[in-house]
Image: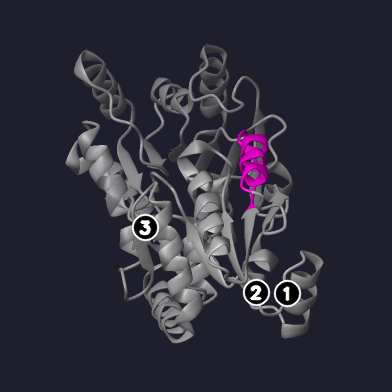
Amino acid sequence: MKHIVQVLTDTNVGGAGKYLLNYLKYFDCNTFRVTVILPEGSRLAPYIHLFDDVTLLEAPHMADMSYNKQCVAYLKRLFLKIKPDVLHTHACLSARIAGKQAKVPVILATRHCIEPLPHGLKALAISTLNNALCDYYIAVSRAVVTNLLESGIKRNKIKLVSNGVQPISPLPPEEIAALRAKYGVQNDETLFGIFGRLEEVKGHKYFIKAARQVIREGHKAKFMIVGGGSLESSLRELVNHYHLQDSVIFTGFVPEVASLLNITDINVNASESEAMSLSVLEAMSLSKPSIATDAGGNAELLKNEESGLLVGYADSASLASAMIRLMNNPHLASRLAQNAYEKYSRLYTVETMVSNLENIYREVLENVD
């Protein structure tokens, strides 16, 4: 049985954490033994504890830091003790350095986002280091493959494993009605939802500006912002400035968003940069139509006018027009949602993702053997 060690630096439950949890639900426990290493006090830990066949270790000096000298020393000692066959890291440079020092047979890294490109001598130094410390990089979308290549990662080191998610289960109509009433959403109002951390890259201010336009034109709608982050107070100020307090709903951080996605009529992604949006994938799994920016992996998930509507980043006018268009054309919204669901079922289930990932584990382990 081969030992897979997964290392994640996140202290909160973000996209990488959901990716890991999805893997743990479906991994081949007859072939692989899995250990997860998290920072001390990570919010992911209680979820990992639910898996009886997974070992969880909590490491010092790691929290939300890609590199820490003390963390490297700790992980090196740990790897020499637990002897991974495959070290799979998620934004943890410390683990890759420690893995090399401990002579771990295979080191993988998944890139979950589109990273800014360095320039000049810095770019050369970073690409040289990244190529030396990692045997293979796993990209969660074709957009990330491009980003890795532009970052100087060698083509033969890159493997594509598209994100996958568990399907969101539909709630009974009476539960949906009760939950919408709880949040003050009337039966004749269209509810737009945006799901993600409240940070600049996610484009929430353009969602709010689009909401102002929709309300100005007299349409009956509510706008739900699901998530927490550093911009919450400034976004609330923007809502107040536009007098949208009765139209925009802030939920704060929500660990499980399935119920809120159930009550949403139309999902929105307004990101500047997106590797492969889990919220769009989850909406696709629930047959909810999505409007998204034509950024990164969004265009892989949603073909414009066929399985979703794509708009430009920071283009609140186009976003508002797309919102109004779907409100006025329920047949179009239904067609987009059905096509998106069929695409999800073919390509983006969590079972497909895990199978593709474990095929890579087997392939790289055969090369080592």
Q: Give the range drawn in magenta.
A: 226-242
Q: Nearer the viewer, residue 260 or 213?
A: 213
The image shows residue 294, relative to residue 134, as above or below, that is below
State the image coordinates of residue 112 (x, y, percent, origin top left): 42, 44
Earlier sequence position, callout 2 versus callout 3: 2
Q: Residues within 10 Å of mark 1 (few under 14, many from 20)?
A: some
Viewer-nearest residue: 68 or 231: 231
Rendered residue at 23%/44% (across/down): 146
Gap in angstroms between the C-alphas marked 2 and 3: 27 Å
- Is residue 100 among the parts visible in the rendering? yes
Judging by the rendered image, the residue that carries numbered circle 1 is: 186
Q: In this view, does 368 lie above or below 320?
A: above
Task: Find residue 281 and report its horizontal and vertical position in percent.
Answer: 47, 64
Q: Which residue is drawn at 62% across and 33% down?
A: 230
Q: Where is residue 211 in the image (x, y as percent from the top left)?
A: 55, 57
**Tag 1: amino acid:** Gln
Determine if the magenta segment contains residue 160: no
Q: In this view, does 218 lie above or below 94?
A: below
User: Residue 39: x, y in percent?
Assistant: 64, 30
* Mark 3 lies on residue: 298
